[in-house]
Image (tube, grey):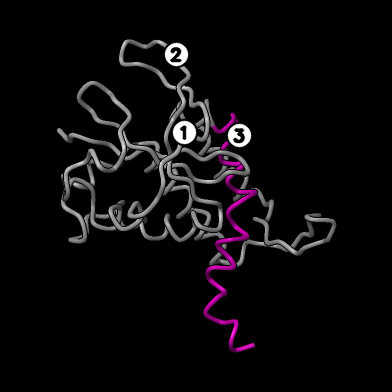
Amino acid sequence: MTSHLLHGLWIKDRGLQLWIEQVDGHKIVLPEAVEAGTFPPVVDQILEGKTFRPRMKVHLRTPKGRQVELPMPTAAFTPEEAVRVLSQLSFLQAELPAATKAQRATIAPDLLWIIAMYRGLTRFVQAGRVTLKTVMMDNSWWPQWQLSASLAERGWLAEMNHTAPGILLKNGGKDLAGVMANELPHWIANHILADYRDEV
């Protein structure tokens, strides 16, 4: 059994929040409390230099089933930054030598769901299943990529939302898959297209 778990939350307009649980006693801890080599090396690189601050109160369920709300120290990543982080973590869903089985076991189911959501959205973007919309920000109109609204996308989002861990829905909203589908495709598309900017 692993000693620590890396958890994730997705909060509307705030993006990805990562936090660490010490399994023994179910304590919330900072990265310094985790022995080197516990997490996959890529996780250590992602967390290196990140400040964990109690940015928000998080709804949790204790091992005895009691609902509590606690100020949670998290490492925060905007949706744009989250694309980089989630692309680095995507390999954890396959058995690759970049992480041992024990290290992969340190990734909590909630974060694995977020990674799966990112991977699915990325596949849709790579397949060209996006359109452009304009959004008003800072008194200006800006173009933004959005996931197309066909039956395939809507069905997949409904399935993903149905399989989301309760902690994610409690903190991120009942339509968390829809929230992520509104926020991530633009940044995924920008990330993919970045390599082609110089060619235009």
Label 3 sits on a secondary structure element that is: loop
Q: Where is mark 1, residue-wise? A: 54
Q: Residue 38 vs residue 29: left or right? A: left
Label 1 sits on a secondary structure element that is: strand
Coordinates of residue 161 in the picture (x, y in percent): 53, 36
Task: Specify the quadrant of the image occupied by residue 21.
Answer: top left
Instruction: Name the residue rendered at 37%, 60% in the picture.
Output: 88
Q: What's the mark number on residue 67? A: 2
Figure quadrant of the C terminus: bottom right
Name the front one of labels 3 and 1.
1
Coordinates of residue 162 in the picture (x, y in percent): 51, 32
Label whose residue precedes the other's in the sequence (2 or 1): 1
First to last magenta residue range: 172-200
Coordinates of residue 20 in the picture (x, y in percent): 32, 36
Q: Where is mark 3, residue-wise? A: 175
Name the front one of labels 3 and 2.
2
Disc 2 residue type (three-letter): Gln
Closer to us: 5 or 46: 46
Vertical position of residue 24 compared to residue 193: above or below: above
Q: How far apart are the alpha carbons under marks 3 and 1?
A: 24 Å
Whether the residues at callouts 3 and 2 have beta carbons within 8 Å, the answer is: no
Label 2 sits on a secondary structure element that is: strand
Name the front one of labels 2 and 1.
1
Q: How far apart are the alpha carbons under marks 3 and 2?
A: 21 Å
Disc 3 residue type (three-letter): Asp
Q: How far apart are the alpha carbons under marks 2 and 1?
A: 19 Å
- 197 in the magenta segment: yes
- 25 in the magenta segment: no
Disc 1 residue type (three-letter): Pro
Q: Residue 2 vs residue 131: left or right? A: left
Coordinates of residue 103 in the picture (x, y in percent): 20, 47
